[in-house]
Image (cartoon, helix red, strand yellow):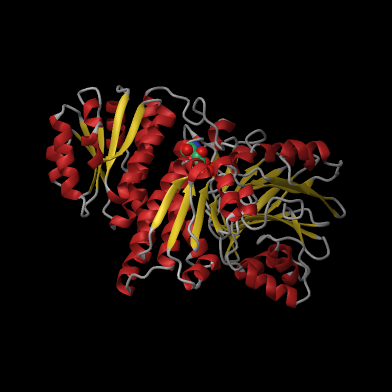
Amino acid sequence: MCGIIGYIGDKQAQPILLNCLGRLEYRGYDSCGVAVSSSGIEVYKDAVRVEALGKALPQFSGTVGIGHTRWATHGGPSQVNAHPHLDCHGTIAVVHNGIINNFRELKRQLINEGHNFVSETDSEVIPHLIEKYYHGNLEEAVEAAVRDIEGSYAMIVLRAGESRLIAARKDCPLIVGIGDRENFIASDVPAILGYTNRVIYLEEGDIGVATPDGIKIRRDGIEVDREEHKILWSIEEAQKAGYEHFMLKEIHEQPKVIRDTLGEYTRVAEPVVDDLAVMRAVGIESMLMLACGTSYHAALIGKYVVEELLGIPVRAEIASEFNYYGQTLAGTAAIVITQSGETADTLRAIRRLKGVGCRVVAITNVVGSTASRIANQTIYTRAGPEISVAATKSFMAQLMVLYWLAMSYSKADSRRLASLLMGLRQLPSKVQQVLDDEDKILECAKFLSRYEDVFFIGRGINFPVALEGALKLKEISYIHAEGYASGELKHGPFALLGGDTPVIAIVARDNTYEAILTNIKEVKARGSPVMALAEEGDEAIGELADLVITVPRVDTVFSPVVNVVALQLLAYYTAKQRGCPIDFPRNLAKSVTVE
Ligand code: AGP
């Protein structure tokens, strides 16, 4: 998720582009750049924040230009990988947001046709494709180029000497801002709100042509009209897309994050993790997963999934503990999970593992992060930048990578695999169902917000979900919450139960069902109110629990996906009820870079 901007009008473009880019940094901030056209195109870009770029930028003159702030997906943050990207002659400049899935094939073809590439990015194929199809009409060249592209894109194209900008979108947002003798094209409303609040939303497949005096939109070669909207949001509200907090926005982004992450990997026949393939070929006996915080909870769920589908023992360890005592067995495949890629404890574990000859695969959300540079192999989650300190969508993307990995190397029979693949593909709509059914969660949050101590219990693959539910509630609502394997309560925590200590039970319809119903009865008998998270159609649970949050039915292996979204919302609305600073809770940092 990058931020792109285009300006065409009667004012100098450069300062306007920088201003708009500054407001798009919530979409990505690892590098940025601008291109301004007068007779030729001048480009300046670097792996810096927009403010620093503004200070270093030479004065370009011109009233038409484009800009980009990046969230790297292909090729680490660097000056050469930053946008805008140019064609061979430097006459066509492009800024792009999205992922081009077939860029490797396109790049090979274009190189065979004599094009020179300078970056590692997927986006650089666009100006070269446009150059290939340019025969005097820029719009037609863009239409031809996008026909070759598989994947998602929002792009703005600038050609030297032309007083117009071409925009195109597919699966990524793109808007037009209507001004007085000037027009804007941008990824999102916050960028342009300082200049105009008259906005047109481009639709899937639209090609827009912006000039200082207007905007023309075509779809499949036919001119179309699009409704103009008046935006009443403040810039901050717009950055949150109308949600009150980044956390709620990021929770609601999860269906798209699941599609983006799975879209990236399920497309290729043979998964690209040759380290794992090699290890399995040489008879890998065990796997070690290491992480911290929420990422550790993803590792714990990964343990259940890999053990079930690959039939090999998996150790899921807390990195900060592993660094002081952990042993590694020869032939251990090591996977480390880290959203930021900068968590000190996890980085130390990577170095320690490599130090004893282990090959390490890192699962991370940040391209170019330290973890991605020191691990032997990296698998990127496609959650986009996560602003809220409490990890939500990044956790979901981590689960998708772990499911895909386990299914790619699974020993399960083809029927089981086929039903799992079907289940995986249905997850975005199942998660959407949970998101659309917030009312019950709101009621439960009101109930929960008046307590100071809470237990979450779960069994099997949902034990880590209990840990994650407790962590989310702790982090943002400041309620003391503990996640527990529900069979463990009777070995001590029972002493804490009573009317002031509610218990949230995650009830999956699997081989642990009867056991957890028994645990709920035991908890009730000790006076604790019980809130149950249960599958739709589970009549029995309503008789037992005081409050029930219902989630859609999925295969047990996928139950953490729907359950964790419900618990994220529960934590969010409980914290809101208590008036907590949800996105930036006290004493916490988004990336913990100290041990
Ligand atoms: C989760 O909401 C927290 N932000 C924290 O526990 C986090 O998961 C942990 O610090 C690990 O971060 P990482 O995934 O970036 O390594």
Rendered image quadrant of residue 231: top right
Is 40 placed above or below 341 here? below
Residue 468's quadrant in the figure?
top left
The front one of 452 and 306 is 306
Towards the viewer: 4 or 453: 453
Image location of residue 512, percent across then percent down: 21, 50
Viewer-closest of 218 and 372: 372
- Give x and y (percent) for residue 338: 53, 47
Residue 545, image quadrant: top left
Give the residue at x 40% y 35%: 471
Q: Name the residue located 14 percent from the left edge and 46 percent from the top edge.
A: 539
In depth, the one of 402 and 320 nearer the eye is 320
Quarter of the image for the C terminus: give it: top right
Q: How many labels does the image show?
A: 0
Using the rendered image of the protein, determine whether residue 242 is visible from the camera's viewpoint. no
In this picture, residue 331 sits left or right of residue 56:
left
Residue 308 is situated, as x and y percent measured from the top left of the image, at 33, 61
Q: Residue at x 67, y 35 (%)?
A: 195
Q: Residue furthest bottom?
A: 112
Where 84 sits versus 331, above or below? above
Q: Position of residue 426 (x, y in %)?
A: 36, 59
